[in-house]
Amino acid sequence: MTFRKCTLRNALPIVAAFLLFAGIQPAEGWGQPTHRQINLEAVKLFLGQANGSEKFAWGPFSQKGLSEPLRGVGVTSSSLLASGFVSAEAALSAQSWIINGGDWADEPHLYASVRHFYDPLRLSGAAYLTDQSEGHGLYDSPATDARAWGLSHTDNPFSFFSALAAYKAALEVRDDLPLPSAISSVHFKTSVSLAPADHDDQRKLYLSRAYRALGESMHMLADMTQPAHVRNDSHPADEPIEAATFSNHVRSAAASPFVDSRIRPFLASAGGKLQAPAELFHRVASFVNETFYTLDTIYDRESKVLPNNRQKGYPSPQLSHLSVEKKKIPGFVGEREVRRFYGVFDSQRAAMIQDRLSFHWFDPEQSFLSDFEGAKEKGGRAVAVGLGRLGPFQIPHAFAAEQGKILLPVAIHA
């Protein structure tokens, strides 16, 4: 046995234990600051298109309604488990409730993580996450997918239809009826009971819940633009495009939006037709599923490349669908040549995958992440090597910027 093999074998249990502690849960979609920015840009887009519309002239989206504080139940914790989740009274504007809802949908993290996946092809037999269920099923196995959870699941107090119900309740408050003793529901995310001071406050309590639920359901739809969340891929250690997409990418996408012609007909705010909510979820998820890879689901039928996670291979994209160029990248002892594959989107293209070399530790496009995310990424690769699950292609973190130009405008417009 060589020293290298011995060292790698001895190190694997340590790295595996680290990853088990750090990444036992399936990773969530875009990071929470990214989700907040997506919701903000979506609100700005909506307001710009609704400006001057008679439909909204007297509604809570008037100037007063946007700035007026609405009392409601917010979140003050960031926890893994429901036992660490903390709610508290808050007074936020309508816009702030929506933006914060984009953050709070990921709380608590373990609870949220298994509910934020929707595979439109159902290759595992279900639309919800089953990859590595032997691990995450130890703490939670809800058997529900992101579309159902975000729209109408009865156990989600902040679904889209919960938002509609709360909004309707606000419109129907009658000043001639007695005030309710409190407005609350039986769920750990709504454990704070707030008593309305008067009928106007009662309306505000309902509106704050409506806007928070809208923000949380917008988060769920935005997750459909994260490739790993529309595939059966739990990606607990590292998903490059997810880890390396930040708020500045969202702002850039909003400032100069590009929407591919394959999804534009289904996005009303991009000139397409209005879709039913469930159909919109499915259309967005299907577009991303068939045009993007994840690190662990790269599959090519012709060259017999199998997914790293050993799940069923997705039929698209295939390497033959992509354009290819040869690139020089830094290696361990000098520059090396690799093939880089690009997805083509109308007049745009985005780097998708490239050949994996034996060492990428010194490639600045791969290893620019630092701290915890960087450690997870390197540890994940080490374990994958030991398990024989590191395929011939990789997705450098630097590809996030190009892929975000395609994905993030869809998240904002959807």
Image (cartoon, rainbow, N blue to C red):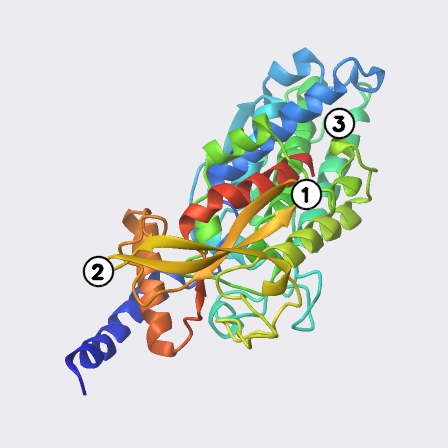
Front residue of this view, candidates 378 and 222:
378
The image position of residue 290, as x and y in percent, is 66, 58
In terms of secondary structure, where does tag 3 sit?
Answer: helix
Dot 3 corresponds to which residue? 170
In screen coordinates, is 346 left or right of 271?
A: left
Q: Crowdedness of circle 2 by 10 Å Cα count: few (<14), some, many (20+)?
A: few
- Of labels 2 and 3, the one closer to you: 2
The image position of residue 337, as x and y in percent, is 37, 59
Dot 2 corresponds to which residue? 333
> Residue lying furthest left in this view?
3
Work out whether 358 lies above or below 209.
Answer: below
Q: Earlier in the sequence, mark 2 or mark 3?
A: 3
Q: Residue at x 62, y 49 (%)?
A: 344
Q: CA distance from mark 3 to mark 1?
A: 44 Å
Q: Amino acid at mark 3?
A: Ala
In terms of secondary structure, where does tag 2 sit?
Answer: loop
